[in-house]
Image (spheres, grey):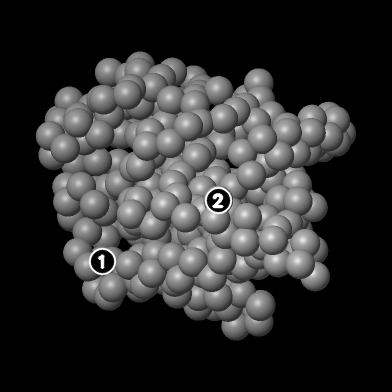
Amino acid sequence: MDHRRGLRMRLDRSRVGDKPLVLVTVGGGGWHQQGVRLVERLSTAEFRFAYVYGINKFVTSTRRLTMPHDGPRYPMRCIAQTHRHAVRRFTNLARFAWSLADAFRLIRRLRPQAVIALATTMSVPLFVAARCLGIPCVFIESLTRSTRLSWTGRVVYHLRLAQRFYVQWPGLRERHRRATFAGAAV
Amino acid sequence: MILVTVGTERFDALVCEVDRLAARGLIHDRVYAQIGMSRPAPTHLDYVRYDRALLDKAAGADLIITHAGVGSVCEMIALGRPFIAVVDPNAPGDHQRQLVEQLTSLYDFCWAASPDALAAELPNARPASRLAASGVDALAIDITTALRSLCNMGSVS
């Protein structure tokens, strides 16, 4: 009992004068725009930020994307989009394993207090790693999804990988009672 | 100057349609097109594959014709220049059409259901005007509240 109280005090003391670290995914294209709109509204007085961006042979430009608040940036191998190339579904199995390994390495190294992901395929491996290590996750479904969740959204929602699951249109909230609708990042 | 953008991927039908309109003289202004990975390359337009200064060019354009991707449409809404968002009917899950239909509940702007409908919409191009609050601030506040509670939870678990 005393040992547990001591551990809790040590954990609390480690945060005195220090702000919680939040790990945020950086996606390309529209995901980046939505991420910027949200992150610029989160306070640096309350949180520190670190960013993770996906890399694979189809996606190389996300490392150059800027985010509103300063913070270290880390690459993570990620799966490729599957909708236009059926063959990628098989190679993506291998990529997912690499991605999961990268996610565990990153989460273990950074030990963030929370992970925020905006509908990128990086969400699943990051959230699996974070949940295994007891770190809470927040998922925000893409603005483009108004009637049906994305594949990533469905996996995160049904496997309950995120403590908070946001949708950006009220119609989706009606179909998914564990989701939260508070507004849209536009 | 008319600026055309297809985002980071490709939109062959839009590039072909604008090229066709320019060839037939239905577009008189100079056209600068960012065509991404679109094929074939246009013959009646000035084009680049990608342009990091595209937003600066868009700020000075008289008309912007953009694909209806979420990033581009949101940028054009914020930019306040006349634009037309053109839906790619082949986009996965028809998500571009869903997006513009939803966005029209928040903003008034011009959009075309496909590149074939672009010519008819050209006279209707206008800057976006807000119809209702998007709730982005409320969303950020809710996320901040959630983070406060989750971060505290994480520290003692």
Under mark 1, the amino acid is Asp
Instruction: Please name the amino acid that badge 2 sits on.
Output: Ser
Label pair 2/1, CB-CB below 8 angstroms: no
Tell me: residue B103, above or below residue A36. below
**Disc 1 sits on a residue from what chain?**
B
State whether residue A137 is above or below residue A96.
below
- The one of B108 and B113 positioned closer to us in this rendering: B108
* Residue in the picture at 15% in, 31% down: B1
Q: Which residue is mark 2?
A: A14
On screen, residue A138 versus residue B116, left or right, reads right
Closer to us: A144 or B134: B134
Location of residue B122 in the rendering, given as x and y in whole percent from the top left corner: 24, 49
Element type where label 2 sits in the image: loop
Q: What residue did someone put label 1 on?
A: B108
Report whether residue A151 is seen. no
Residue farthest front in this picture: A2
Alpha carbons under labels 2 and 1: distance apart: 50 Å
Residue at screen point 73% across, 33% down: A105
